[in-house]
Amino acid sequence: MRNFKAFFYLLLVLSFPFKAICDNPIIFSEKEQNNYIGKYVWILKDTSCKMDINEVQHSGKFELSNQDVPRFGFTKAAIWVKFQVKNTLERRHLMLELDAPLIDEAELFTLNEDGSFITAIIGQNVPFFSRKYDNPNYLFDLYIEKGDLKTYFIRIKSYDQIEIPLKVTTTIHTFSSVITNNFMLGIYCGIMLIMIFYNLFIYFSIKDKSYLYYVIYILSVMLTQTTFQGFTFKYLWPNYPKFEVQSILLLSILVGYASVEFLRIFLNTKKHTPKLDKVFLVAYLFYFIAAILVVIGFYQLSWVLILSIVSPLSMYMLFVGIRIAGMGYRPAIFFSVSWSIFLVGVFIYAMKDFGILPYNNFTVYTMPVGSAIETVLLSFALADRINILKKEKEESQTVMVLALQENEKLIKEQNIMLEQKVTERTIELKETNNQLSVTLTNLKDAQTQLINAEKMASLGQLTAGIAHEINNPINFVSANLKPLKMDISDIIKLVKKYEEIKPSDAIADKLKEIDLYRKEIDLEYTTKEIEMLISGIEDGAKRTTEIVAGLKNFSRLDESESKEVNINEGIESTLTLLKYSISKNIEVTKDLGNIPMIECLPGKLNQVFMNVLSNALYALEQKKTDEKQKLIIRSYVEGEHVCVSFEDTGIGMTKETREKIFEPFFTTKDVGEGTGLGMSIVFKIIETHHAKIEIDSVPNKGTKILLILNKKIDV
Amino acid sequence: MTDKTSILYVDDEENNLNSFRAQFRKQYEVFTAVNAKDAFRVLEKNKIHIIISDQRMPQTTGVEFLEKTIEKYPDSMRLLITAYADIDIVIEAINRGQINKFIQKNLGIGKNYHWQLKIVL
């Protein structure tokens, strides 16, 4: 921002009428020391940059400058300045000040009386600490005795715009101005640093990106400003003169970028003026190119590029700021004001550069002052932004609170609805539960009924068997009685006939008669028949007794007490009761071993035997063949167990039947023939005896059922 | 040979045979057999007017036995005694055994089948 229209100056310089070199010495006095000596110097442009002092010394191409501060803009040429100083003061040590810290290199040649030269070189290309005077501005010693006149040449070379503000002063004056300069810069840096840290802290606490960009922006502005004053070279990278040359370029680019980015974020240009915002991207492109130019070493070209976009861009930024301010966005008003103040500072500085305003302490400092004021104002703007954010936050909080209240209301309503629903569901569940309880009770009742039915069915089966079994012997007992009576009455008649014989009667006749009768009734046969009939009655009575005994044994069906019994008896009595059901072609083999008494529920076990044997007999009958069928019943001891096996050669079971055999209501019998509960009851009884039941069955081959009972069980 | 009506009674229960013989030997000429095989032996040797058989016997049932007698001894009267009132047996007995009378065995001790038989005969 420092210089505009560099070529304009060049044109100005070139357009001056040629002047012959003549002596135009600076008559140095106390009054003179505040003024730039531009009008006292001769200038020579060495476009080849190859001329040396000897060549220059005698060159006639020097022209008198007519400006207080000669300017050349960008030039690749080396500028030679020639001037003469006549000292009117007592002190011989004077200072030559070149207030252009950005000039890359300045070499002073002092012409001695003998025609030789003393040289002194200062510049950005030389490490800072090699300077004699620890100051950003270039200071040269001039030693002139009172009344003497000395001639000096300065060779200046720079990638930057070249302007040559030269002053001849006393040492005291120089150092007081250096102190002032440093003081001013100190104040400026102080303001900037405070702003940097303040905004950095704000950034850390509220994490608003615009603060970060603001910090970067101020930092870069501060560095740029101090670089212009030559202080960064002094304090930050004194040992890197090469970087000093690049730094001002890079910092200028950074300032441009950071200011634009800050503006975009701060004013939210994307949202407010999306079309205007796009222009900034073009600016970024320019800056990017400029940065690349710096990196590859085209410093001057980079400078031209930066300077050519700087003024349109700053005006454009102001325009955008005002535009957004016009939209009623408060930060934009702050921005516009502060940015205009900064631009005024720049404008005054530029006016100074143009020569419209004088090159003095005020004009020199307008830019830092403008920048400081801008910084402070922007900081106010950011603070105001906090207010806005706060307001927005409060508003959003109010909205949120309202929403929350609304939500709470809704939740309350929903809760009421939910509670209602829960109550309804609970009632439904209770009802269901009640229904289920009723169903369960019904089922239990049904189960009890079914078990009872099964019991009745087996009892019925038993009764039928028993009735028949008893019927047969009783039948022949009663059937024998009639003929027995007849036979006995025949014999009684015979005996009576013998009794009728009186001693007086003719015994022979009588005996003959009796003998006839004897033959009639066939006494011999009758006697035999009587024996036969009696033995038949005996047999019948015996068989009936057996059955009754068996029944008595079996009738433990309902005993619930566990007793020590020999289960062989149970098997026997069960078989007795089933005897009638066993068809004649079934050969029953009993192989009942010598087994110990075991503790069990005898009635229940008999029920097991009854069910298993009934099934075996059913399976045998279903085979429907004339072949002899076998039913083998075994009981034996095996270790701690008493085993009973029932083996038949019946129809056997399929795998499906085998799997479902213990399921209640599963039956292979026709409807009405079986309850389907027999084996499930068997399983239950076996379970209560902690016993095991093993089934081994092959369809059409037969079935083997093995009961494994414990010798001692706690039922 | 007498003029008495001859009866063949077949039953696997020997006591029943004894009882029957004792009951009826005076009025009738009574033959008995414990199985079908014996029965046919008797039939071969004697002229039998009435054949009575128990239904439930090993190997050959009463109906089966009676059925076999139809061809050789069509004139004989055939009676079946059974404990069952099973309709299938009754149907079989009539259709296959061509029986003249069906006597139920188990009517109780007081009214045993001999009396029924008496009424029948």
Image: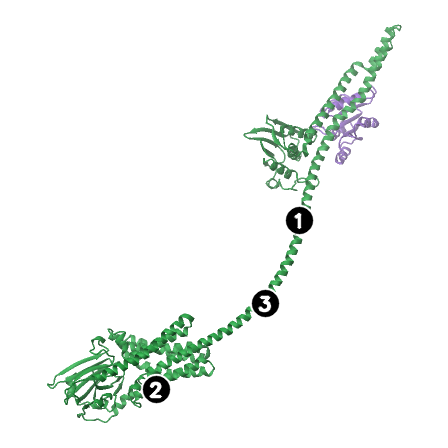
Chain colours: A green, B purple
Q: Circle 3: is it few (<14), some (14-19), or many (20+) Cα within 10 Å?
A: few
* Same chain letter for marks 3 and 2: yes
Residue B84 picture quarter:
top right
Query: Which of disc 3 and disc 1 is earlier in sequence?
Result: 3
Going 60% across and 63% down the picture, which residue do you hit?
A415
Image disc number at residue A437 = 1
In percent of width and height, residue A131 lies at 21, 77
Q: Is residue A233 left or right of residue A474?
A: left
Give the letter of the chain under mark 1.
Answer: A
As drawn, is A325 to the left or to the right of A158? Answer: right
Q: Quadrant of residue A704?
A: top right
Name the element at disc 3.
Answer: helix
Callout 1: SS: helix
> How many numbered discs, if any?
3
Query: CA gap, disc 3 to disc 2?
Result: 62 Å
Drawn side of residue A667 relative to residue A328, left or right: right
Q: Residues within 10 Å of mark 2 (few under 14, many from 20)?
A: some
Q: Nearer the viewer, mark 3 or mark 2?
A: 3
Say which quadrant the C terminus of chain B sits in.
top right
Q: What is the C-alpha distance between the residues marked 1 and 3?
A: 41 Å
On the same chain, marks 1 and 3? The answer is yes
Is residue A694 something one can see in this rendering?
Answer: no
Query: Same chain for marks 2 and 1?
Result: yes
Which residue is more in the foreground, A171 or A430? A171
The amino acid on which the numbered mark 2 sits, given as a three-letter code, is Phe
Q: Disc 2 marks which residue?
A: A347
Q: Earlier in the sequence, mark 3 or mark 2?
A: 2
Q: Chain of mark 3?
A: A
Viewport quadrant of the N terminus of chain B: top right
Q: Which residue is mark 3?
A: A409
Q: Say what amino acid the circle numbered 1 marks.
A: Ser
